[in-house]
Image (tube, rainbow, N blue to C red):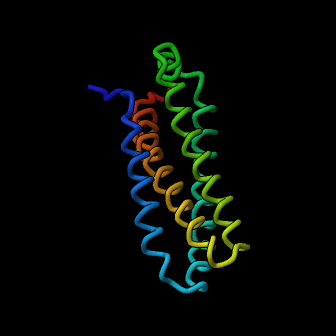
Amino acid sequence: MARTIRKGRYWVAWFAGLAGGVVACLKLLPFGDAHHYMVAGTLASVSSTVLGFIIAAMAILSSVEKTLLIENMIKAGYYAQLIWEFFVSAVFFFLALTLSIACLFLGPPLLAWVLSGVFWAIVTASGFLLVAGYHFYLVLSNLDGA
């Protein structure tokens, strides 16, 4: 019996992102400036890498669009849901990338707050990406190769 894609509970991703941002803000405020810049550079690198993988996954989805499984997913509305999940993940990772790069140019008072926003965006995007990745796995595992 094949598993199917169900509509996700996205409020979990939003709440996890908010909690991650608050915890990051509380933890990062006492640190020195060098730690902030090092963390911002690392998060920019991670965000850009994951964003590239999301774009590659969307390219794979568009290349298998002519199969019977994908045609049935389009009729049922699951394909649009899957594309939406990847798109939202990509938007949040792009937001995290942009904020991380901005952190490299900010001064100490604003730096910790913007960096906590980066953590919020990354945790939220990761929540969406976990759901989208599982749905993508279901699509790829159910392709029959015809």
Q: Is residue 88 left or right of residue 16?
A: right
Q: Which quadrant of the rendered structure holds the N terminus?
A: top left
* Vertical order, 64 against 97 (above or below): above
The residue that appears at 62% across and 31% down in the rendered structure is 62
As rendered, which of 77 and 142 lies closer to the eye? 77
The residue that appears at 44% across and 32% down in the rendered structure is 139
* Vertical order, 68 against 102 (above or below): above
Where residue 59 appears, as percent x and y from the top left, is 64, 39
Residue 8 quadrant: top left
Where residue 67 appears, as percent x and y from the top left, is 54, 22
Residue furthest front as drawn: 109
Where residue 57 appears, as percent x and y from the top left, is 57, 43
As rendered, which of 126 and 101 lies closer to the eye? 101
The residue that appears at 53% across and 54% down in the rendered structure is 121
Residue 86 quadrant: top right
As rendered, which of 45 and 31 lies closer to the eye? 31
Residue 32 quadrant: bottom right
As rendered, which of 143 and 82 lies closer to the eye? 82
Where residue 29 appears, as percent x and y from the top left, is 49, 76
Residue furthest right as drawn: 105
Residue furthest left as drawn: 1
The residue that appears at 35% across and 26% down in the rendered structure is 4
- Count of residue discs: 0
